[in-house]
Image (spheres, helix red, strand yellow):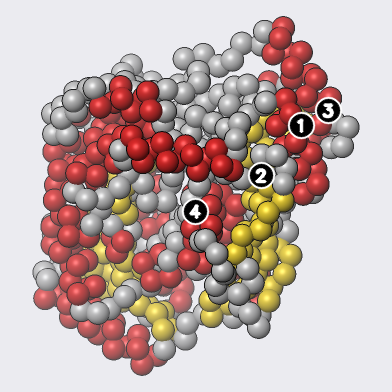
Amino acid sequence: MQSAVASPDRVAKRQRIAARFSEFIDSHYVISDSETLKPYECDGLSAYCEEALIVVLPSTVEQAQKVLKICHEECVPVVARGAGTGLCAGAMPHGDGVVLSMAKFNKILEIDTDARAARVQPGVRNLAISEAAGDYNLYYGPDPSSQIACTIGGNVAENSGGVHCLKYGLTVHNLLSVQFLTMEGELLTIGSEGLDSCGMDLMALFTGSEGLLGVVTEVRVKLLPKPERAQVVVAGFDSVPKAGDAVGEIIAKGIIPGGLEMMDGFAIKAAEDFAKAGYPVDAQALLLCEVDGTDEEVAEHIEAVETLFRELGATSVRTSQSEDERARLWAGRKSAFPAVGRISPDYYCMDGTIPRGQLTHVLLEMQKMSEHYGLRVANVFHAGDGNLHPLILFDANVPGELERTEEFGGKILELCVEVGGCITGEHGVGYEKLRQMPAQFSDSEIEQFHKVKRAFDAKELLNPGKGIPTLRSCQEYRSLDLDLTPNAQVSANSSADAGEFRV
């Protein structure tokens, strides 16, 4: 599909709105030429692209307010953008809209050691919070693989997790308050400085709303004390089912790991070649299980985990003996995505969640799908909470391969729903998963989503065409009478109902 054509009307509109923005924002930060707009045409899911009408980078809340008020007055769509590391096309621009970049909101405003909290702007990198809090022996819990680059505003939008979310929760569990702007430019705050707030739990509603309800301007997050001790056990298995069974057994023993991650043989080899973490490359599956807490607690749980892994048939068991070794073992897992990128021209990272008990079944079904579609898959995921991140390897230069990859990915998500899971864990719906929303939600539920959207954004100008499909597209999807078996042939674009964009 083609991006928006620079018609005379479009050019005139761009010039008019850019001129209004330039009255209160340095014109250097009001971007309207195609060359400079290019880096903003997609997020981390680069298969979906669109050129924005304008990109604007305010530096104050007052400037962001004025931008939103002008766009509301002009009925111009607005897409808020953080670091652009998202993987669901959630930050893909609207072809007739404004990208509101929060990159200049990058200050840590306060570290409150007594309350174990930090007050930060949305453009602050996830890892930067822990780096700043480290001087006080504190850190921020959620740690997505992209934490070196992703921003806290984007984390709030997607309700990001990370390798330690099993024990310490997702973003929503680590927030105290969020300040945001409505589409009309009204500044609101939800939550409080305390651990609880009266009234409706708007924090749970807003977190993970993918920029559909408001634009984050400030966040107050919880900080955690660094544990006395943390060690990670790496166990190799000669089959995926054995590793899958071990995940449930650990939880059943009453041990809640700080992190519990799984990789299949393909991902192990790719990560080891890239990061040199010391993984057993002959294993068909690998588990990383981190235990943290007091010295006595960690010693007891490490012994129990090692014993359990050996009883369940682990071919190798290794425990970190230093902080450097622990960091190196986790670095291998967190670098799995770029590692796979080295061995394939392109890859498509999926994100779905399943009950832990269905782990082995789903992995085996995905293997069947892989054979059917003729596409390799590297499995890397948060095994403890059932959050799958299959990486489908493909070559976008081969005609039809992207479409086949999309269809494969859609089948994985539908399988997640079929076994009692959901179509997203932490990457969001964005544009990517609109087609699968009707597989999980009824028409009445989707209409309820639209009502909530309109309560915050009556003109539906914030990130339109993302997150919530239209009821018409849902009806088109259901009319297909979908077969959820691996051999079913369904067009990946059969229920698309969004604006024109370039693939």
Q: Nearer the viewer, residue 382 or 206?
A: 206
Residue at image coords 38%, 28%: 471
Say which quadrant the C terminus sits in.
top left
Whichever of callouts 1 and 2 sits on the residue coming sooner in the sequence is 1
Residue at image coords 26%, 64%: 287
Q: Position of residue 318 (x, y in %)?
A: 27, 74
What is the distance, in whole Å, between disc 3 and disc 4 at their CAs?
Answer: 33 Å
Which picture quadrant has residue 129? bottom right
Q: Is residue 147 above or below residue 473?
A: below
Residue occupied by mark 2: 182
Whichever of callouts 3 and 2 sits on the residue coming sooner in the sequence is 3
Whichever of callouts 2 and 4 sits on the residue coming sooner in the sequence is 2
Callout 4–callout 1 Cβ contact below 8 Å = no
- Counting other residues with Cα less than 10 Å from the Cα at mark 1, is it few (<14), some (14-19), or many (20 or more)? some
Q: Which mark is residue 20?
A: 3
**Callout 3, which amino acid?**
Arg
Q: Nearer the viewer, residue 413 or 86?
A: 413
